[in-house]
Amino acid sequence: MYSIIVVPARAVSTHDQIRLAPGDRLHFGRSAPRDAAGPLGPAGAGGPRHLDIPHPGVSRSAGEIMASGSHWALSNFSPACTYVVENPEGAGEHIKIAPGRVGAPVPFEFSRVVLPAAGELIDFAVWAPRHDYVQCVPDSDGGEPTALAFPLDRAKRYFLVLAALCEPRLRGAPHAPLPTVDAVVDRLRPVWPAANRAAVQWNIDYLAVKLRLKPGPDSADTGPRLNGKKETLVSLALRFDLVREDDLETLAVAR
């Protein structure tokens, strides 16, 4: 049973996809390895298959993918180029695979492998749809329940503000500049007619306290000045999935 699906950049149908079972390897590069019985091992019978990337800026032996049960590992055979694995659903989330790194684990369910190639960026997709989750939590000992790490109420106006701040990056522009306070006001006014600049700024300040980025007003320690407050809030929210793409439905009436 396959667990990893590799989708070449020019794939037009499922026949172009490459399915890997746990333990399978897929070599990728400009051409197949010159010596199939060399250090990469023999092809077939568990040996590596090949994904051809016909670009003069891609090494003949660029790297290798190893499939596991619910994730995969990437080896970078380049002596100089860093590869990047992006999470297209992660609003900019990515990992870097250094030159010569072997067997770097990739945890994303959907990934885009990006290779620098003579002034261009070449990419292909890797899907890891088999994700295993715990089915039940063992009974507790009857003690106090665990406090929530980030207690957010999605019915509150502060969550509307946070969703509006995160919206550009959740909609596929991970490096987009954050909306200004005035832009957030305009975005929210159809669902929050009383929205104004002061109210939105108050909610941003409240979120900074609620998410423990700065001490509350009743604290004797005011803490250091929080520069880039919006950027810090959005970075935290996207990193820990406090706001997801489906949460943008709360803004749908505003469209």
Image (spheres, rainbow, N blue to C red):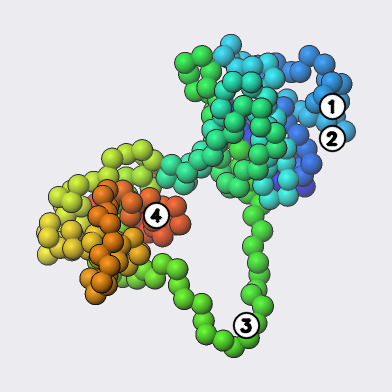
| Residue in the picture at 58% in, 11% down | 56
Q: Do the CB atoms of the residues marked 1 and 2 lie less than 8 Å apart?
A: yes
- Which residue bears the numbered disc 2? 46
Q: Earlier in the sequence, mark 4 or mark 3?
A: 3
Say which of marks 1 and 4 sits in front: 4
- How far apart, in angstroms, are the residues tagged by discs 1 and 3? 49 Å
Residue 208 circle label: none
Residue that numbered label 4 is attached to: 236
Q: Residue at x 12, y 60 (%)?
A: 198
Q: Secondary structure at mark 1?
A: loop
Q: CA distance from mark 4 to mark 3?
A: 30 Å
Answer with the quarter of the image where residue 32 lies: top right
Which label's residue is closer to the chain start, 4 or 2? 2
Q: Earlier in the sequence, mark 1 or mark 4?
A: 1
Of helix, strand and loop, which one carries label 2? Answer: loop
Element at label 3: loop
Dot 1 amino acid type:
Gly
Residue closest to the eye, 247 or 237: 237
